[in-house]
Image (cartoon, rainbow, N blue to C red):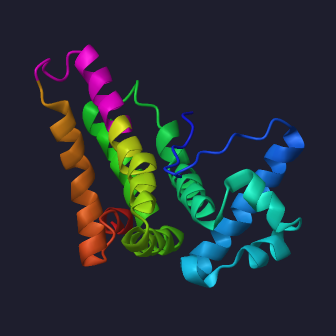
Amino acid sequence: MPTPVSSSPEPRRQPSTQRGRDRRAQLLRVACEQFLLGGYDSVSLDAIVAQAGGSKAAIYNHFGNKDALFFDVIAFLCEEFLAKLRAIDIGSPSLEAGLRSILQELVDVITAPRHVAFYRLVVAGSARFPQAGRTWYENGPVVCQGVIMQLFDEQQRKGQIAGDAPKAALAAGALRCPAEQSHHTGRHPGAARRQG
């Protein structure tokens, strides 16, 4: 599984010990919940430390500052939301079945209340920090398009897609449709199918 891309201005080294990795993960988990609940401005490093334990020095050591922690939270949450998408077997299904599986998973993710809170966090954060938007884009839409491109590559290898097909444009279009429908209309595109 690819490592999430952080657009932090000063990338930090990963801890070399298991204890350090566990500590960093705990701080990230707590920061995720607090940022999702209150947004960037209402969360303090003191509040994160109070819930996670330890000291502010640990945050500075692992992340550098609050802004960099925020960008790492965005990358971490993207990875969480897309874990099932990355696990979809793109090797065996037909093109139609593969696209249906991918797009249904994306719709399920983007219409979940936790993701709606995340999307609001990213939009608000991006207005203040362009790096927040870049981190989301690199770890969200780019990853989704990559999964669709893998499916297209596999289908092309099987001869189901022409060799000169504009796969990148197809992948971008496949992503745009369900996302726009659910975000702009508030309706879950798979709801009618599941009720029927």
Report the side of 101 relative to 161 (left or right).
right
Q: Main secondary structure of the magenta part?
A: helix
Residue 137 at x, y percent in the picture = 38, 52
Residue 61 at x, y percent in the picture = 77, 53
Instruction: Judge whether 117 appears above or below 93 on screen.
Output: below
Q: Nearer the viewer, residue 181 or 26?
A: 26
Image quarter (top left, top right, bottom left or bottom right) of the N terminus: top right
- Part of the protein shown in magenta: 147-164
Instruction: Judge whether 97 appears above or below 186 on screen.
Output: above
The answer to whether residue 150 is magenta is yes
Report the side of 171 relative to 111 (left or right).
left
The answer to whether residue 104 is magenta is no
Question: How many numbered badges does the structure rendering display?
Answer: 0
Residue 122 at x, y percent in the picture = 44, 68
Residue 132 at x, y percent in the picture = 45, 61
Q: Nearer the viewer, residue 95 or 87?
A: 87
